[in-house]
């Protein structure tokens, strides 16, 4: 079973965002992360040491050692569908003589994996991507949303995991929940590996989703990140030109996304043949309908 790549998802999700800007009902997707009961605690010495080992391995470009350490922290070296994965803890660092919280173990591990260069990404795909793809293909063949969400939350740093996140965002939009879609797309956009793979359209999708929820500040932040990553970009969907260069203002881009009707983005999209079809559309439906 093959999953459709970004070209299909970009047009489909963007058109759906523009079609449902005010509907906020439906059940959304929230990534699962394990935590200790109650509030998060400081990491035990062995966990903190493992994170330090992973950072040293990344700095010395020892990708196999780094991915093994990070996968151990995430609890995915030997993980089943029903497993909770690794436990999460606060990460403390000393900055200017003061001890401050710098995220959590889970967040740090996911970020380090998603920001690895191409050599590291190759190791990630060999170690975790193959299994993630197998699970995602199984999930799609049965249209098992619990399993798709499992891949999206646990393997977001793999190609299959990022595809699962796009599917989760599409589902949230289809159920009339652009707020949940915006959260998923925002998390995806902040991953360097996802930006490199999916390109500027991912940024536009995220901006449009934030606009659909009325989150103007979040839309501007997503647009700023997108433009830093892609200083010059343009495309044309059904005669509607979207893009920017150094002379284009943020306001003009935001206005274009806010004002364009959904119809120009609607086009036939080839989709995988899911048994029984999809609750929103079948394989030959038009994006946005």
Image (spheres, grey):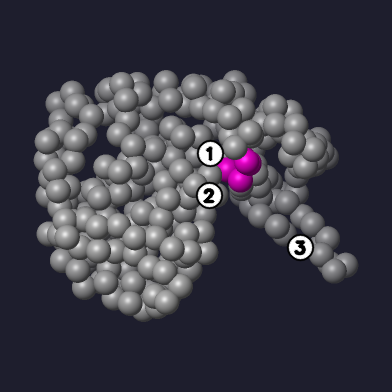
Labels 2 and 3: the sequence-earlier one = 3
The residue labelled by disc 2 is: 191
| Residue beneath the point at 27% across and 23% down | 142
Labels 1 and 2: the sequence-earlier one = 1
What is the C-alpha distance between the residues marked 1 and 3?
A: 26 Å
Q: Nearer the viewer, mark 1 or mark 3?
A: 1
Please provide percent x and percent y for residue 217.
43, 74
- 10 Å crowding of disc 3: few (<14), some (14-19), many (20+): few
Q: Nearer the viewer, residue 102 or 217?
A: 217
The residue labelled by disc 1 is: 157
The residue labelled by disc 3 is: 100
Residue 60 against residue 125 in the figure, above or below: below
What secondary structure is found at the residue carrying circle 2? loop
| Residue beneath the point at 61% across and 28% down | 123
- 10 Å crowding of disc 1: few (<14), some (14-19), many (20+): many
What secondary structure is found at the residue carrying circle 3? strand
Are discs 1 and 2 less than 8 Å apart at CB?
yes
| Residue beneath the point at 34% across and 64% down | 243
What secondary structure is found at the residue carrying circle 1? loop
Q: Nearer the viewer, residue 178 or 60?
A: 60
Q: Based on the picture, tell me whether residue 14 belongs to the magenta stretch.
A: no
In this picture, which residue range is highlighted in magenta? 113-117
């Amino acid at each position: 079973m093959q999953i459709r790549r970004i070209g299909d998802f970009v047009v489909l999700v963007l058109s759906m965002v523009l079609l449902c800007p005010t509907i906020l009902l439906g059940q959304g997707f929230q990534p699962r992360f394990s935590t200790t009961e109650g509030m998060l605690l400081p990491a035990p010495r062995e966990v903190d040491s493992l994170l330090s080992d992973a950072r040293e391995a990344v700095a010395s470009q020892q990708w196999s050692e780094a991915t093994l350490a990070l996968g151990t922290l995430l609890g995915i070296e030997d993980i089943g569908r029903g497993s909770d994965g690794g436990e999460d803890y606060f990460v403390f660092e000393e900055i200017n003589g003061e001890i401050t919280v710098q995220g959590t173990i889970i967040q740090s591990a996911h970020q380090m994996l998603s920001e690895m260069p191409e050599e590291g990404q190759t190791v990630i795909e060999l170690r975790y991507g193959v299994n993630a793809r197998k699970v995602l293909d199984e999930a799609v063949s049965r249209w098992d949303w619990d399993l798709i969400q499992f891949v999206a939350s646990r393997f977001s740093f793999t190609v299959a995991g990022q595809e699962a996140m796009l599917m989760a965002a599409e589902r949230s939009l289809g159920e009339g929940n652009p707020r949940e879609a915006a959260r998923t797309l925002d998390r995806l956009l902040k991953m360097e590996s996802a930006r490199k793979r999916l390109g500027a359209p991912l940024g536009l999708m995220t901006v449009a989703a934030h606009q659909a929820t009325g989150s103007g500040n979040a839309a501007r932040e997503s647009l700023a990140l997108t433009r830093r990553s892609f200083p010059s970009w343009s495309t044309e969907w059904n005669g509607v030109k979207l893009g920017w260069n150094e002379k284009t203002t943020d306001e003009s881009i935001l206005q274009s996304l806010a004002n364009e009707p959904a119809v120009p983005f609607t086009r036939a999209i080839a989709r995988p043949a899911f048994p029984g079809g999809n609750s929103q559309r079948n394989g030959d439906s038009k994006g946005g309908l």
